[in-house]
Image: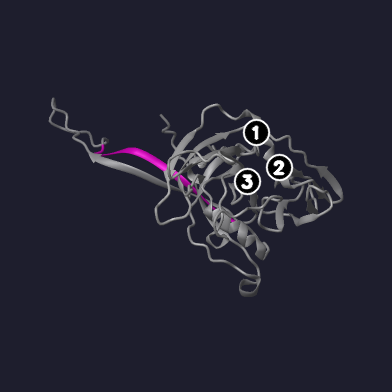
């Protein structure tokens, strides 16, 4: 018998897969359009409401279990008797695919960065995000780190520590022998400028670091309002010349940082692109992790053929007013 409608109980939770909540977060009922042969239900935006992104230089796994329990109904509005309902389980991250990837693209299941290079200041450790379900070990300069996954959402994305002055990272499949990705670590000696670490949520839903090594400039844009006041004293019908007619109020400011990557390889174009596309960015600034917003909106892709040496300049606004007005 033809399909009439579906009922979907959608569960979203963190922890172990066995910790499914008793009550679904969403109950969805959708009927088939007469001219269609199937029913399409978009759950991505519903799930995203339960992915709370937070970062304080702590590199925690931002994933959730998602279970869709789908029950199918016939034209007589009776449940099908065979293989009904069906249960679909997913691990959700706050990532995205590109248009050319098609519908529901499967993102990386191993190293959760697009580029094949990582730039770090000399004598500085780094972090490599990996998807634990698809990785057996990570080898850094011939030293193996075994990857284990206990099924908890806090283990799904893991951040492997890159030791100081490392050279080569190799990411292997769960069989520990199939090489999935090789990443070169480039350690930059910068004696003149202060490198700034930018951390952003990349297309895979993982935190990725990007250092800006070269010239930086800081500027402040002040905003205010003014009103014209009456300064005449009624008792003397005179005014004091040291009291102004115009008075400022609602004064605040926003700070902008102008940062330069320094010379990087062409494959880092993908990383810069994801930085421009992200909704969540932080900077390590004066010993604190502070939220910023990329102010630069136009990205001119650079290549070694056209530009020889590739350097990107990006402006960032701090995502808060300078004068504390949090109420």
Residue 235 in the figure: left or right of residue 326: left
* Magenta stretch secondary structure, dominant: strand
Query: Does residue 247 belong to the magenta stretch?
Result: yes
Disc 1, SS? helix
- Depth check, mark 1 against mark 2: the one in front is 1
Above or below, comparing residue 14 to residue 217 in the picture: above
Read off the residue under disc 1: 17
**What's the mark number on residue 206?**
3
Is residue 194 something one can see in this rendering? no
Read off the residue under disc 2: 159
Cα separation between marks 1 and 2:
21 Å
Cα separation between marks 2 and 3:
9 Å
Range drawn in magenta: 244-260
**Nearer-the-camera pick, 223 or 288:** 288
**Nearer-the-camera pick, 87 or 241:** 87
Position of residue 107 measured from the top left corner of the image (x, y, whole percent): 63, 53
Task: Tell which residue pokes out farthest to the right in this image.
Answer: 142
Going from the N terminus, do you reach mark 1 or mark 2 first?
1
């Amino acid at each position: 018998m033809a399909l009439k409608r579906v009922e979907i109980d959608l569960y979203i939770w963190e922890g172990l897969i066995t910790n499914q909540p008793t009550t679904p977060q969403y109950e969805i009922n959708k009927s088939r359009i007469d001219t269609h042969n199937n029913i399409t239900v978009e759950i991505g935006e519903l799930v995203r409401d339960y992915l709370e992104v937070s970062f304080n230089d702590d590199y925690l796994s931002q994933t959730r279990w998602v279970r869709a329990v789908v029950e199918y109904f016939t034209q007589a509005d009776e449940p099908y008797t065979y293989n009904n309902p069906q249960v679909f389980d997913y691990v959700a991250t706050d990532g995205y695919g590109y248009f050319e990837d098609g519908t529901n693209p499967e993102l990386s299941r191993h190293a959760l960065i697009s580029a094949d290079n990582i730039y770090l200041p000399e004598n500085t450790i780094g972090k490599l995000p990996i998807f634990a379900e698809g990785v057996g070990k990570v080898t850094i300069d011939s030293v193996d780190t075994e990857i284990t996954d206990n099924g908890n959402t806090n283990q799904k994305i893991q951040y492997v520590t890159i030791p100081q002055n490392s050279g080569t990272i190799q990411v292997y499949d769960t069989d520990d022998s199939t090489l999935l990705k090789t990443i070169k670590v480039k350690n930059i000696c910068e004696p003149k400028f202060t490198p700034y670490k930018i951390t952003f949520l990349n297309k895979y839903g993982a935190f990725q670091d990007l250092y800006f090594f070269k010239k930086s400039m800081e500027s402040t844009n002040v905003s205010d309002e003014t009103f014209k006041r009456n300064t005449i004293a009624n008792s003397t019908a005179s005014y004091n010349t040291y009291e102004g007619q115009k008075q400022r109020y609602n004064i605040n400011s926003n700070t902008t940082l102008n940062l330069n990557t320094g010379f990087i390889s062409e494959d880092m174009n993908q990383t810069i692109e994801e930085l421009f596309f992200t909704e969540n960015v932080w900077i390590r600034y004066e010993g604190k992790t502070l939220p910023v917003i990329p102010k630069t909106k136009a990205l001119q892709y650079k290549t070694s053929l056209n530009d020889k040496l590739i350097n990107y300049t990006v402006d960032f606004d701090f995502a808060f007013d300078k004068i504390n007005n949090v109420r």
